[in-house]
Amino acid sequence: MPHDHDQTDGPPLAHHFDSLQQQFDSARLGMWIFLVTEILFFGGLFCAYAVYRANHPAVFVDGHHFLQTPLGAFNTCVLLLSSLTMAWSVRAAQLRRRGTLVAMLGATILCGLVFMGVKAVEYRHKWEHRLVPGQARLQYWFSDEHDPNGVEPPKEFLPDREYIREHLEAAGYTDLTDEQLDRRVANLRTFMAIYFSLTVLHALHVLIGLGVLTWLLLGATRGRWTSGHFTPVDLVGLYWHLVDLIWIYLFPLLYLIH
Amino acid sequence: MNETTNPTNEKPGAHATGGVAHVADPRVLLAVFAALIGLTALTVGVSYFDFGGLNIFVALGVATVKAGLVALYFMHLRYDNLFNSVVFLTGVAFLGLFLGITLLDTVEYQPGIETFQESQLK
C-alpha cells in the first residue's frame, strides 16, 4: 500500500482516495459485492436442494433421520458464538485494544475448530456406513479386489443396507420389501449427495475463514490492526458472518425436516 | 445507537476510528447473540410440531429473522451506508429469481420424468 500521506495515527490513505472515509467505504462495498457472489455461488446448490425437495419431499423426510440433529444444533450455537466473538474483535480493533482483539480472534478460531471437529465426527459416522457420495468407487479402487476392466463396485462397497433398514424401522417404516429398500437406499444416496455438496462447500469456507483469521491473529499480536488500520479485521468479519449466515439456513433445511 | 446514551450525537468511539465506522455497543452484541440462541432453540423446538405444508415456511421464517439479526447488527448494515444493504438485497433478490424460476420450470417436467422412471423399473 502506498504511503504518500504518511500518518502515525490511523491507516495510510492511498492516493486515489479523497478521504479515509471514502477509502473505508470502498473497501466495505467491495467486500459486500464479493459476499453477493458467494451467495449466488451457494445459490446453485440451494437450487439443487429446492428442486429435489419440491419434487421428492419424502426423500428428505427419510434422509434427515440419518443426520444427528443434536450435533447440528450444537454446531449452530458454536458458529453463532464465533460470530459474537468476531463482532467483538472488530470492536476491539476499532477501539485499539490489542489484548481484547487477540483474545477474541483466538476465541473465534477456537469456535471454528470445534465446528470442524464436530463436522468430522458427523462425516466419519457417514463414512462408517458407506453413505458418502463416491465412497464405493473410491474404496473399491484402492481395494485388492479392484478389477481394472471397469465393473461396478460389488455389494460390500455400497451403502450399508442393514444399517439403513434398522434406521428406517426405528423411524416407523417396518416390513420394507427388498425392492422398497433398494429404492430408499437410492433415494438416501441422492439426499447424501446434496447434504455433502452443501456442507462440504460450507466447511471449505470455514477452513478458508480459519486461515484468514490465523493471519489476523498473527498480525494482532504485533499490534498491526490496533493503530487505526482495522479495515482487514472488519472485512474478514463480514466474510465470517456470511459463513455463519449460510449455516443458519443449512441447519433447518438439512437437519430439521418434519 | 440511540441518542439518549450518546448525547453528543457523535458516533461512539468515533475518535478511535477516525469517525469512519460505527463501533458496536457490547450490550447490543450480547442481546443479538442471546436472541440468536433463543431462535435456534425455537426452530429446533417447533420442528417437533407438524404444521403441515407450513413447516418449511416456519423453519425458513425463523432462519430469515436470524439472518436479518446477523446482517443488521453483526455485519453493521443497520449503521452502514444504505448502498451496502441495497447490494446485499439485490443479491438475495436474484437468488430468489433463480430459485423461483427454476422451480416453476422443473415441476413442469416431473410427469415426464415419472413416466420414464416407471418404464425403466419394468
Image: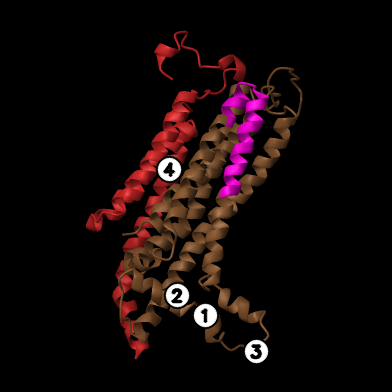
Q: Nearer the viewer, residue A18 or A133?
A: A133
**Which residue position holds label 2?**
A163
Is residue A250 found left or right of A135 in the rendered image? left
As drawn, the chain in brown is A
Q: Nearer the viewer, residue A167 or A25?
A: A167
| Pointers 4 and 1 within a single chain | no
Q: Quadrant of the C terminus of chain B?
A: bottom left
User: Which mark identifies residue A158?
Assistant: 1
Residue A100 counted in the magenta span: yes
**Residue type at numbered disc 2:** Tyr
What residue is drawn where x is 33% and y is 87%? B119
Q: CA distance from mark 2 to mark 4?
A: 45 Å
User: Which mark identifies residue A147?
Assistant: 3
**Residue type at numbered disc 1:** Leu
| Mark 4 or mark 1, whichever is nearer to me | 1
What residue is drawn where x is 54% and y is 40%? A82
Q: Nearer the viewer, residue A231 or A194?
A: A194
As drawn, the chain in red is B
**Residue type at numbered disc 3:** Asp
User: Label 3 near label 2: C-beta < 8 Å?
Assistant: no
What residue is drawn where x is 62% and y is 50%? A207
Question: Is label 3 in a helix, a strand or a loop?
Answer: loop
For disc 3, the neighbor class at 10 Å (few under 14, some 14 to 19, many from 20) is: few
Mark yes or no: residue B60 visible: no
Question: Is label 2 in a helix, a strand or a loop?
Answer: helix
Q: Quadrant of residue A31?
A: top right
For disc 2, the neighbor class at 10 Å (few under 14, some 14 to 19, many from 20) is: few
Residue at mark 1: chain: A
Q: Which residues are magenta?
A: A89-114
| Pointers 2 and 3 within a single chain | yes
Give the percent coordinates (x, y) of residue B28.
Answer: 44, 26
